[in-house]
Amino acid sequence: MRDVIHDSFSIDRCRRSSSHVQVCHHFHPCFELYYMQEGECSFFLNDIIMHLTQGEALLIAAMDYHKSTYEKKGFHMRSIVYFKPDNIEPSVLHTISRSGNKFPKSQKFSIHPDCRNSFEDILSRMLTESKIKTETSELLIHFYFQELLLTLFRDSTAVTEDTIPIGSTENAVQAAAQYITRNSHQDLSLEDAARIANLTPTYFSKKFKAITGLGFKEYLNHVRLKEACTLLLETDESISAIASRCGFNNSNYFGDAFKKVFEMSPRDYRKDNL
């Protein structure tokens, strides 16, 4: 599993043929703007399944777990920008912020067809400058990025949710993932989640990992650790109290699990991010 990406700002574009199938799952402490320029792919984001086609973009918030899968259907091209809110000018952040002072949460966008060329042109200019690596190019990338965000929020429509056929395996896995998210503080078992999905535990375990990229226990731990990160920064509760509140019965196990993922202790995470 690719756990954490540490770059504070980077841009990448990739085009692959129909013979390539890629499955990538990770989370990272920066935001990600994913744009589908050609082809299509599916995403598992937190506990929701989304499908992206040409001209659609996905804004992924920091620490939101996601997995992308590319199907064997012709060529596909995608561009990705990794960034942090610090990379955004205050005036731009104020303009696009949905909550007044915080950057928007994960969201899918459909860019208007007559605006896609201009959006893709901004991405191309950013990519060109990223290969030059001079002080001037860094400034240009910064300003192009502001233009990219403003264009995204002005020239697109937010997509609230994808329609997943009722009774499908995807629908069943999504229901189970959402159940895990809502009840992660409780003592959950694989059998509990399989019951929500109305599948046998063995079949559910196989399909859950195929769709989410994680096994049941891994996914449960991720949900708990993400909640722990929030509590570490937003409360003064002790480490042991946070561990218990998030569903970890043993604070030592919580510390080991946290350090394995974030490469630091919960105490150091709180200290470094406050």
Image: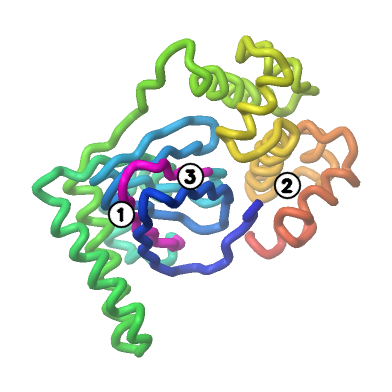
Q: Can residue 83 be found in the magenta stretch? A: yes
Which residue matches tag 1? 94
In this rendering, the answer to whether 166 lies above or below 187 is above
The image position of residue 89, as x and y in percent, is 32, 66
Q: Can residue 228 be found in the magenta stretch? A: no
Q: CA distance from mark 2 to mark 3?
A: 36 Å
Amino acid bearing label 2: Asp
Residue occupying the far front of the picture: 19
Q: Earlier in the sequence, mark 3 or mark 1?
A: 3
Residues shaded magenta: 67-84
Q: CA distance from mark 2 to mark 1?
A: 29 Å
Q: Earlier in the sequence, mark 2 or mark 3?
A: 3
> Dot 3 surroundings within 10 Å: few (below 14), some, or many (20 or more)?
many
The image position of residue 155, as x and y in percent, is 17, 47
The disc placed on residue 68 is: 3
The image position of residue 206, as x and y in percent, is 66, 28
Horizontal relation, residue 64 to residue 42: left or right: right
The image position of residue 38, as x and y in percent, is 27, 50
Count of all numbered marks drawn on residues in the image: 3
Q: Residue at x 44, y 47 (%)?
A: 60
Q: Residue at x 64, y 34 (%)?
A: 209
Where on the picture, by quarter, is residue 190?
Answer: top right
- Quadrant of the image for the C terminus? bottom right
Q: Nearer the viewer, mark 3 or mark 1?
A: 3
In this rendering, the answer to whether 99 lies above or below 62 is above
Amino acid bearing label 1: His
Residue occupying the far left of the picture: 114
Give yes or no for contact between labels 3 and 1 (Cβ–Cβ under 8 Å). no
